[in-house]
Amino acid sequence: MFIFRSWMVAALGIVMSASVSTAQKAPERIFLNAEIFTADEARPSAEAFAVSEGRILAIGSRADILARRTPATEIVDLAGRRVLPGLIDAHSHAIFGGLAALAPNLEDAEITKDELKRRVRSWAAEERRDGNAPLVVFGVNSGTWDDPAALAALFDSGEWAARPLLLMGSDYHTAWANGAMLARAGIDRRYVLALPEARRHMVGAREDGEPNGILVDAGLDLVSVHLPKPDEKTLLEAGRIAVKTNNGYGITAWMDAAANAGPGEALFSRPPGSLGTGVLPAYRALAGANALTAHVAALLVASPQGDAADLDRLESVRRAFLGIPNLTLPGIKIFADGVLEYPAQSAALLGHYTNSGKQGEMLLERQVLRGLVDAADARGWLVHIHALGDRAVRESLDAFAAARGRRDSGVRHSITHLQLVDPGDYPRFAQLGVIAVMQLHWAQMDNYLTELVKPYIGETEFRGQYPARSLQRSGAVIAGASDWPISTANPWEAMHHAMTRSGPDGGLNEAERMDRTDMLLAYTRHAAQAIGLEREIGTLAEGKRADFIVVDRDVLAVDVEALQNTKVLETFFGGEKVYSAE
């Protein structure tokens, strides 16, 4: 079992010093008459707490906390409401969520091709920019790619003959581009036929090699770099939407899992040495406007062709954004593979897709993956790996094992998504101290699973998707995440799906259902560990930040169907109210 000796010593020192300093202060505010879920093992519940300078001075019984009252202390009566720590999203693309909200967006709706044509034409007519600028439509349901020839018939002639169009999939791993957009990116039959076999899957093509418009992972980068970059005003507006949306759901911290990527930049295939700042300027602008009312742990995407030297280049980006209030840059994100859904099928499997006999592709070679993980671990950087297929998960665990064999860094690394995990790898998460960051909103039967996954993998693999309970029983720490805007940022819906495993098309392996308290911990204490801020947030405890929420129902007692409709009444960040439902 991986033992966090250095972390425990440091944490103990911080807690002791915080206790000494807070004990000497008078409370600015006392919050009382509440049912408090603290997420703290030492004190799971409380009635009241005192706050000063944005931190919790003391927490406990009403009588004990009121004993600290001074004439200058403000008393806040919470009227018997349920209070929890501020929720934490351990994998989000919040600024992308804001940008998507400002742009044409289908919000993953399943619509007919005729309705798609109508909406796209309407958005095109509303565009005030140069008619030759690409029109990008976000939130397109991946089922739309079922007939690329039909899309070409709609958007490759007439008004679209010269107007570039990109339909961005809700998964942000797939898209469809019309002929004008492909031409702008230099993607034609010659380009497709020149691709090595291992990269052919990234550009969809007919049998004769002519591209059909479907783009997958690195193929999407080929057109993304030709999209206009948002200006600072737009980034700030998107940032404000991101903060408002998250605070409204009770989220006071998140991991931005690709902060150095953005529109107009490559994401899956960033060449070594090509550095962008992505959405990081949005966070700087928010902080400058005193509007970043959340802790953001921003990760930088490492190049799939990168090495230790590439981390030196990423360090130059980190240095440019250090010191921004409420922003940390704890490490890197690595894409190990793509997505499981047809037609992409770019998630790396131990088995095979039944329609093609292929196994999907790792986005970087084994030795490159191990080298990046080892070099980042040696620096004390957090490593967060995107892995959906069971082969990608195993390769990621192998890379962490190699690094653990070299040193005890004390860093809590993580793997995210985990759609398929081989049972033999379940116990390795606990053994290696690797956190399982899971988007359990996806653990429901919908058209993605029934139409785009089920026909193409074995029944055992299909039932085993998102094995949260199995991982937990094997000792893994489960952290909650949304991957917004790929799915909603609403954590209450995600908790519901994790606890019911149901959806519009039936249930998905009830044996993997999670318990209520486990899901609350997944979005508090465990998510704080995943983003490297467990010493500051994640529990309501003496010395920690006074980030907390007040909700409209007792989320520890209501039935699971009522849980998903939970409304946040108030969100506090550093003891100050930053959201109110009124």
Image (spheres, grey):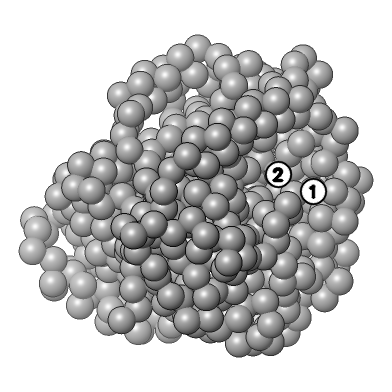
Q: Residue at horizontal 76%, vertical 36%?
A: 433
Q: Is residue 488 left or right of residue 582?
A: right
> Within the image, what quadrant is residue 296 found in?
top left
* Dot 2 and dot 1 residues touching (CB under 8 Å): yes
Q: In this view, which residue lies farthest toward the right?
A: 424
Q: Residue at horizontal 70%, vertical 61%?
A: 44
Which image quarter holds the N terminus? Answer: top right
- Judge whether 520 appears above or below 387 on screen: below
* Coordinates of residue 218 in the picture (x, y in percent): 48, 41
Q: Nearer the viewer, residue 149 or 374?
A: 374
* Coordinates of residue 255 in the picture (x, y in percent): 49, 46
Q: Nearer the viewer, residue 170 or 19?
A: 19
Circle 1: is it few (<14), some (14-19), or many (20+) Cα within 10 Å? Answer: many
Q: Residue at horizontal 72%, vertical 67%?
A: 517
- Residue type highlighted by circle 2: Ile
* Coordinates of residue 356 in the picture (x, y in percent): 73, 55
* First in residue order: circle 2 vs circle 1: 2
- Judge whether 468 appears above or below 493 on screen: above
Q: Nearer the viewer, residue 298 or 374?
A: 298
Q: Residue at horizontal 44%, vertical 32%?
A: 329
Query: Quick check: can you spot residue 1?
Result: yes
Which image quarter holds the C terminus? Answer: bottom left
- The residue labelled by disc 1 is 476
- Secondary element under disc 2, as helix, strand or loop, is strand
- The residue labelled by disc 2 is 435
- Judge whether 13 appears above or below 52 on screen: above
Circle 2: is it few (<14), some (14-19), or many (20+) Cα within 10 Å? Answer: many
- Residue type highlighted by circle 1: Ala
* Coordinates of residue 500 in the picture (x, y in percent): 73, 79
- Secondary element under disc 1, as helix, strand or loop, is loop
